[in-house]
Image (cartoon, rainbow, N blue to C red):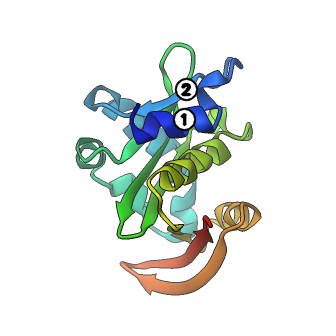
Amino acid sequence: MDAAARASSASGLNDMTDMTHKAIRPATALDLPQLENCAARAFSPYIPLIGRKPAPMTADIAAQIAAGEVFVATDADDAVLGYIVFRTASLRMDLDTVAVRPDAAGRGLGRRLIAFCEDAARLKGLDSVHLHTNAAMAANVSLYSRLGYMAVARRHEDGFDRVYFTKDLN
């Protein structure tokens, strides 16, 4: 059993029987159209706040899939409800993107995807999870704080005002 499968099992994510979410699995190239649609639907409401497309809307998702960095949350019909992008960096996990379709939002799916990332990090023996979000995404800033992430920096880079977070897993 690979680390992602163990993380899914440890999180109890494959045991969920509600119709909104079946499992978290590695993304494949066949998921790309659904992932691009999910990103557009999840992040386009932020364009007026930021003044341009948020970074996940312009990311090379195909390359992230090829690198094994993308995991999808699916429903019983294997339709993508949300996804997460993360990668190992030294002794930490870098969480890049969490996206949930608006029609699947508000049911804890984003939290489950983040827990999946944290469990994958623990299974690899990593010390922490690091991430950043746009400061204009107030709901995300609040969510990460509620999940135990500590804001450690705020920077303006690549034209975005970003808040950096870290969560110690020890």
Residue occupying image coordinates x 65% and y 23%:
15
User: From the viewer's perspective, is residue 167 above or below residue 20?
Assistant: below
Q: Which of marks 1 and 2 is nearer the N terminus?
A: 1
Name the image quarter holding the N terminus: top left
What amino acid is at disc 1?
Ser
Residue occupying image coordinates x 69% and y 17%:
17
Return the residue nearer the eye: 95 or 123: 123
**Secondary structure of residue under mark 1:** helix
User: From the viewer's perspective, is residue 57 above or below residue 163?
Assistant: above
- Residue 129 % position (x, y): 53, 65
Q: Foreground mark, 1 or 2?
A: 1
Residue occupying image coordinates x 57% and y 32%:
9
Q: How crowded is mark 2: few (under 14 residues within 10 Å), some or many (20 or more)?
A: many
User: From the viewer's perspective, is residue 158 above or below residue 49?
Assistant: below
What amino acid is at disc 2?
Ala
Contact between marks 1 and 2 (CB within 8 A): the answer is: yes
Query: In the visual, does 134 lie left or right of 157?
Result: right
- Residue 29 % position (x, y): 26, 31
Residue 8 - label: 1
Q: Residues within 10 Å of mark 1 (few under 14, many from 20)?
A: many
Return the residue nearer the eye: 107 or 25: 25
Residue 23 - label: 2
